[in-house]
Image (tube, rainbow, N blue to C red):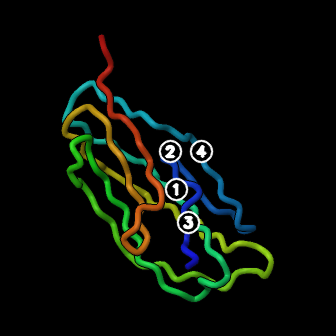
Amino acid sequence: MIAIEVPLAVLADAANVSQEGKLNIFGIFNRIGSVNFPALHPQMQLILAFEADHAEAEQTKTVEVQLRDSDGTKLLAISGTLKVPRGEAGYPIRINQIFPLNGLRFEKPGDYVFKILVNGETKNSVSFSAVQPVP
């Protein structure tokens, strides 16, 4: 069985997809800082690239993005469906997705992870840390 994959998953300050279909990513990071906790992070974007084979064209996939803390507690879940387009013969089908995440609250410093699931199967993850700078 052929399954959709997620070969690219990053957190960044900003991203866009050009008219030509180019994915532009600005300010990739894996650490955020705050003097005080709980902390509110004003804005970040989770950028994902899904890649599918032509055998999956026109199929609908269930996608879920989960934010979990170091204890494994699910803090946030975003879910929806993704319909795989036909694509161009001879090339893998690539679907770029940008998830704007505004006002995320982090109760404590520590390690966090965004898990990306397709049809209930983890396809990729993005780990990052929320830190409190030492004076």
Q: Residue at x 39, y 34 (%)?
A: 32
Q: CA distance from mark 1 to mark 4?
A: 10 Å
Q: CA distance from mark 4 to mark 2?
A: 6 Å
Q: Whole-percent x and y of residue 85?
A: 62, 83
Q: Residue furthest top?
A: 135
Q: Nearer the N terminus, badge 4 or badge 2? A: 2
Q: Do the CB atoms of the residues marked 4 and 3 lie less than 8 Å apart? A: no
**Which corner quadrant of the image does residue 4 belong to?**
bottom right
Which mark is on residue 47?
1
Q: Is residue 69 left or right of residue 89?
A: left
Going by the numbered disc 1, the residue's amino acid type is Ile
Pointer 2 residue: 13
Q: Nearer the N terminus, badge 3 or badge 1? A: 3
Q: Residue at x 58, y 62 (%)?
A: 49
Going by the numbered disc 4, the residue's amino acid type is Phe
Pointer 3 residue: 5
For marks 2 and 1, give the one nearer the viewer.
Answer: 1
Viewer-side residue, 54 vs 64: 54
Q: Whole-percent x and y of residue 15?
A: 57, 53
Going by the numbered disc 3, the residue's amino acid type is Glu
Q: CA distance from mark 3 to mark 1?
A: 14 Å
- Please tell me whether residue 57 is drawn above or below residue 49 in the rendered image: below
Q: Nearer the N terminus, badge 1 or badge 4? A: 4
Q: Residue furthest front?
A: 1
Q: Residues within 10 Å of mark 3 (few under 14, many from 20)?
A: some
